[in-house]
Amino acid sequence: MGQSQVRLNKKKAFSLIELLVVIALLGIISLVAVPNIREWLVKKEMEKDLNTIMSIVKNVSNDIGNNLYEMGGVFFDNNNGNGLIVKVRYRGPDKYRAFQTCNNNDSEWDPKWDGVETYSSSSASEHYSTFSNIRLDRATANFCFSKNFTVNFTGNVSLCHKEKNTNATCQLVNTNDPYYDLIVQRTGRTQFLKYSYAKKEWVQQ
């Protein structure tokens, strides 16, 4: 009877050690896995917003190519780090004859034309979308497309994720931080390049 009790106690003690080992292993795995999962979620969040931003730019380019307007502009505002605002504005023939520069002055852009623009609107002359997860690497930037497919721009549109940057603008410090640059060609073709920390240059995704 005494020997059976000793064997039972040994079995219980061994099971407790196993449990402690499992808990320790789970802790180690969580330290490695949880940051990786968050990195993946950040990447997916950013890719979703980047695709939407690219669609906005392409739609403006297509509107000009289809002669719906004389000129279209896409304006990026970092909103003091409170979420990227992407604003779309258009010029008809009269406004285009008077103004051909790529700026964001209210008086130089036409009210929206019914049935063409689909973005949320805060007024009759501007249409915007807000991306709460995205930061711009500067205060403002813009692209403008004119009828002859000329692209005017002020500053590159380089974007990062808010979680990786507590500052108002992108200031990357970690080699895992996702960082993208929007490229718009004269033909209206758009693409995002991703910054490679290993190569220290922008590369195609």
Image: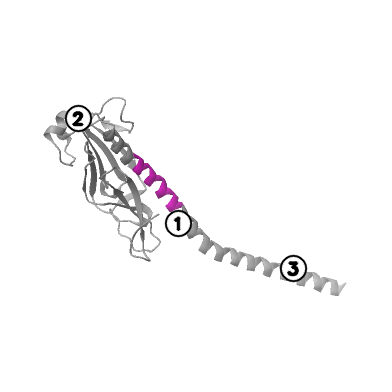
Amino acid type for the residue under numbered disc 3: Lys
- Secondary structure of the residue carrying tag 2 is loop
- Quadrant of residue 142 within the rendered picture: top left
- Quadrant of residue 52 within the rendered picture: top left
Amino acid type for the residue under numbered disc 1: Glu
Tell me where residue 38 appears, x and y as whole percent.
46, 55
- Secondary structure of the residue carrying tag 1 is helix
Q: For the residues marked 2 and 3, what is the alpha-carbon distance in whole angstroms?
A: 83 Å
Q: Nearer the viewer, mark 1 or mark 2?
A: 2
Amino acid type for the residue under numbered disc 2: Gly
Which label sits on residue 92? 2
Q: Residue at x 31, y 28 (%)?
A: 116
Q: Which residues are magenta?
A: 41-55
Q: Residue at x 17, y 35 (%)?
A: 106
Q: Which residue is mark 1?
A: 39
Q: Which residue is mark 3?
A: 12
Q: For the residues marked 1 and 3, what is the alpha-carbon distance in whole angstroms?
A: 41 Å
- Residue in the foreground of this view, choosing between 141 and 122: 141
Q: Residue at x 80, y 73 (%)?
A: 6
- Please check the rendered image and state whether residue 50 is part of the magenta-colored stretch, yes or no: yes
